[in-house]
Image (cartoon, coloured by chain):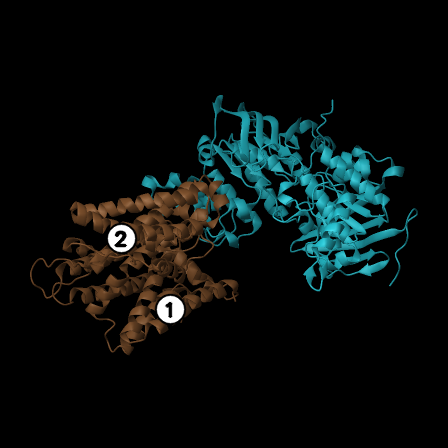
Chain colours: A cyan, B brown
Amino acid sequence: MQTPPTGHQSPLILEMRSITKEFPGVKALADVNLAVRAGEIHAICGENGAGKSTLMKVLSGVYPHGTYTGDIYFQGAVQSFRDINASEQAGIVIIHQELALIPELSIMENIFLGNEPTRFGIIDWAAARVRAMELLARVGLADSPDTPIKEIGVGKQQLVEIAKALNKSVKLLILDEPTAALNESDSQHLLDLIRGLKGKGITSIMISHKLNEIEQVADSITILRDGESIETLDVANDGVNEDRIIKGMVGRTLESRFPDHTPQIGEKFFEVNHWNVAHPQIPDRMVCKDSSFFVRRGEIVGFAGLMGAGRTELARSIFGRSYGKFVSGTITLNGQDIVLRNVAQAIDAGLGYVTEDRKTLGLNLLDDIKATTVAANLKEISPRSIVDRNREFEVAEHYRKTLRTKTPSVEEGVNKLSGGNQQKVVLAKWMFTQPDLLILDEPTRGIDVGAKFEIYGIIQELANQGKGVIVISSELPELLGLSDRIYTIFEGAVTGVVDKSEATPEHLMRLMTSSRVPA
Amino acid sequence: MNAIKQLFGGNTRQFGMIFALVALVVFFQIMTEGVTLTSGNLMNLLNGNAYILILAIGMVLVIIAGHIDLSVGSIAAFVGITVALAIRDWDLPWWAGVLLGLALGAVIGAWQGFWVAYIGIPAFIVTLAGMMLFRGLNQFVGKSNTIPVPEDFQYLGAGYLPEIGPNTGYNNLTVLLGLATVALVVTMGLRGRAKAARLGAVVAPMWVQATKLALISAAILYATYLFATGRPGTSLPIPGIILIGLVLFYGFISSRTVIGRHIYAVGGNRHAAELSGVRSKKVNFMVMMNMAILAGLAGMIFVGRSTASGPSDGMMWELDAIAAVFIGGAAVTGGVGTVVGSIIGGLVMAVLNNGLQLLGVGADATQIIKGLVLLAAVAFDVYNKSQGKPSITGMLSRGLLTKNKPQAEAVEAAEDKIPTRA
């Protein structure tokens, strides 16, 4: 066993060497290196899918030792964590973006969940209370420890998570998008707290899409791209700013992964103006803020934004108010103001929406291909409300042939298909509704490269038929290759629109990570 | 071996429940020395179980949509007593009583559907409340008395088709009904095959189709013979005719109409259904309402058979109906199940009950055996699914009345022939 080399400033507390993690068919991490010095705040940056969360799951034992290759050195020793408990024993605590708190239990009960102080096997609530008060004081939370979690905001919940971590005598704290759901002042409080913990010798790893925050608090930054570690920047010495980080995040070239396509763009036919939508459960939290955009016939419009920016919320709130609480705004289709109160009305008006999550929102996995193909336009093949199963078969066969879906028969269950072929069936379902405007939410997620190329071809063909297409994607190269025009969305607001000819990854990334619209 | 595979769709296990039913009948036929398959016993079996099977039809739709209904027995009892009282006190003719009962069922169903669909209370809670509520209303309205119904109303639950035409020694109407059914089955089977072939789908060889139709026809003709040759004045019983009508109707609705598709869609994945334009609230409302209407009908048929409505009618019916549905291949999580499957499940329980009774097995042992059968049937299905093998559910959810079935089977049969497949 060798000891890890030490850094030039303070010793390394953590070193991950040549970490490679594969999932069936995908290499999520390829030879990734990460070195974190004791007592620093180390940021990890990268686009969606760059491998940030996977790397943290390897570190925290979610993916146990043996399911990846490479070595983890923590506090000078090689570690082989079997599970999260093992990594917590060593002093590594991860706080996930989706908080792991029980809403019905109190702050105190949550802090000690799974780690209850006991005397003779009985929980010692008196000791717990004293300890809880101490911890809450450290994170700057003034609420009573008996307050139920569901009654405090996300910002305070985040602090409870940190208190919980402190209780486990954390040495390395991992925060995955800690400020994603927080407002400005809560975010600031949290960042101050992380800085304060640093003063007390606690090392932090922070994953964030908000580059201004990273610039503010991080001591060093490791950039991941396509599952590889690209570089590690020293904030103080390397003169790091947002542009420098963005360059590292997107610095790849566009390959010719797209079919040739000459857009035939017609007149503007679909327009959304001043669209405001509130969160379905929290009425004063806006998920869409005064968003306006339009689509022309034959045009492929991209929606760029980082995860959680509100792209899906925008699309679904337009698609028959299937998300959130409508507040205000107008939709104009072919010069007419229209109101779409439910999905059926949206479909009738000529809208289609291909969901981002095929398995939970897009498909009934119990159905076969033919039933799925006609599911959104049953009435077309059902005179007098009776399903004409011969027509159903014909329609499904037609789309199977034109989209080249690989399946032994249209009687096959959709759960037996690969991701790419499932997506073709979903596309067929929406093409059969004959939409004027088709919204595609992450149309190529979880699909291999060959099938992606085919899906792009289908999208372009739809545009050629004079339909408007909106593509929501987290992959910038995909948007740049496919779209004629790209809107950027940040925290629920449209922050810019860029023509294909002027779009660069750096420019888009800037608009996607900041509400400040550059001159 | 290959021939049998082709005939039964490549996987004999898929027909497990039908085989279980046939095996049960054969077993009891032998054990009872021929009493099981006699006219009298079959009529008893049908009359004594028709109301449970009718409930199972409604229940399978509720379960496919992802809910449950615990109140059906109480609703049946409440509707039964109200109708009996209305006929006695207001001198209603029998048909007006039936209409009143169906309307009352609809109102009750709308009440429960409202809470389930529009307020979003789990059906388990709503119908648990309904179970107490309508049981109480039955005893409140009837003052815990037994109310007799007149003879013409009893026809509904214990009547037979009239004797018409020349004296052939058979019940002529039953014979006609049987022959008509055979003709219908054969025509539909052959037409479906022709259509599928015209569309270019793979169809099973003619001899497979022919054997299948011959088997079904023989079964129908044998049943016709038994029902037509009972003691004079009997025939296929009226509850049986109502049941067959309902099975055909709801089988069609569930597999062939837009609303049927929507029920499966909501149960299979409500979010996906809603994002495809399905109004899931309306669907949920309708299945709950439909269930209560059928419960009302079942209650009236039972009252007709037992000649009076009492305070403890319909006790535990909901559980018998739910058992039938799950034995028939439905999934607790929704989205899976068929009307025909549930009827077969109900018949398995009914034959078991009847056969054990004929053998003189006590009620205690009968309960134990029925409980184990329910557990075994579902366990078998769950095990098969966990092994990645096709389940009974898979077969039943494809539907027994579908005309595309031969073609689906042919595909499977063809796949089975591929040598590389394990």
- Residue at the left extreme, as displayed: B166
Give how far across and how far down residue A189 sits, in percent: 76, 37
Counting residues from the N terminus, which is met first, the one under dot 1 or under dot 2? 2
Residue A48: x and y in percent read 69, 42
Q: Is residue A401 visible?
A: no
Q: Residues within 10 Å of mark 2 (few under 14, many from 20)?
A: few
Pointer 1 indicates a residue of which chain?
B
Circles 1 and 2 on the same subunit: yes
Which of these two is toward me, B251 or A102?
A: A102
Q: Quadrant of the C terminus of chain A?
A: top right
Q: Are marks 1 and 2 in contact (CB under 8 Å)?
A: no
In this rendering, position of residue A237 left or right of residue B315: right
In three-dimensional space, the C-alpha distance between marks 1 and 2, rounded to whole angstroms, equals: 34 Å
Give the image quarter of residue A184: top right
Q: Which residue is mark 1?
A: B370
Name the residue tied to disc 2.
B143
> Is B124 placed above or below A293 here?
below
Amino acid at circle 1: Lys
Across the whole image, how many numbered discs are drawn on residues? 2
Q: Quadrant of the N terminus of chain A?
A: bottom right
Indicate the chain on which mark 2 is placed: B
Residue found at x 31% / y 69%: B353
- On the question of residue A485 being in view, the answer is yes
Residue at image coords 57%, 47%: A420
Near mark 1 (Cα within 10 A), the count class, few <14, some 14-19 or many ≥20, is: some
Camera-nearest residue between B72 and A50: B72
Mark 1 or 2: the one toward you: 2
Local secondary structure at mark 1: helix
Towards the viewer: B151 or B270: B151
Task: Label 2: state its secondary structure.
Answer: loop
**What residue type is disc 2 on?**
Lys
In the displayed structure, does residue A13 sit left or right of residue B275?
Answer: right
